[in-house]
Image: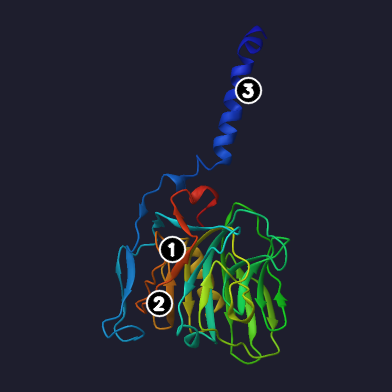
Amino acid sequence: MEYLMTYGWAILIIAVVLGALFELGFFNSSAFAPKIGPGSCQVYRPQGPGTTAFESLEGTCNNELPQYAALFSSGSSSAIEIPGGYSNTIIAPFTVTGWIDNTNSASAGNGQGVFGSWWGLTIDTSNTLRFWTAAYGNNGGGGFINKGEWYFIAAVISSPVNPTITVYLDGAQVSQFSYANTLNGCPEYYIGNGEGNACSVGTTFNGFLSNFQVYNASLSSNEILALYQEGIGGVPISLNSLQGWWPLNGNANDYSGSQNNGVPTGVTYSTGWSAGYTAP
């Protein structure tokens, strides 16, 4: 008893410090794992951008963890613009996938934008992932997202007219609904912004984003699950239909071989992204 009374305060302080370090992810193995730098893996298209003959992956393409993730702030016009001419290639059918870590509660309105323009993936005020379409403000419900944790998201759009839209969270379907109208393309798209009305920048995302991929095809549920199981450093699963690949590992470049490099505004690239990440 005398020992506990003498040293109890020290034991308590050590316990508090260990708890704080655990909460900050200090003991997360992802924080110590080796990480690859920007551009370590990319798609090679020998016949030029957009071609599908003889394409292949080149570089360090073994699903290693990235060195950086893109950090967005909802308090500014933080976004990555994918320039004009790109939208016509992915009106529908298409699939968009990516990894998100929402570090703050969503603000007013429809919440935080994740990807898109005129349509998009968003997180609403209750931290629920949704697919949003600007024409009538329709929301396709999805799964609940905790702050400070990484999630894999995907939306599969079946066609440009009256499409079926399927939303996935961590490889599992969480929503499917029909949109009774035509999905219109925009002159550009945005990463870090998901609900721009009339193709403009809307509310911006607050947190980390990583490894966004866009396909001009409706990926199957098995393909979505396989992408999730690859983890945050996963490579594209279908090179023939891949239209854009932004790992966001230190820059906004497109590594799909299509040369659709993004133009970032108010975006930083952080090495401290792994605290809330657990490999699948």
Q: Residue 83 or 259: which is nearer the viewer?
A: 83
Q: Amino acid at mark 3?
A: Leu
Query: Is residue 233 something that shows in the picture?
Result: yes
* SS label for mark 2: loop
Number of callouts: 3
The quadrant where residue 144 appears: bottom right
Q: Nearer the viewer, mark 3 or mark 1?
A: 1
Q: Residues within 10 Å of mark 2 (few under 14, many from 20)?
A: many
Tag shown at residue 134: none
Residue 128: x percent and y percent?
69, 64
| Distance CA(mark 1)–CA(mark 2) | 13 Å
Q: Amino acid at mark 1?
A: Leu
The quadrant where residue 258 appears: bottom left
Residue position marked by numbered label 2 in the rendering: 260
Residue 108: x percent and y percent?
72, 63
* SS label for mark 3: helix
Residue position marked by numbered label 3 in the rendering: 12
Residue position marked by numbered label 1 in the rendering: 248
Tell me what residue is drawn at x 58 percent, y 35 percent.
20
| Distance CA(mark 3)–CA(mark 1) | 41 Å
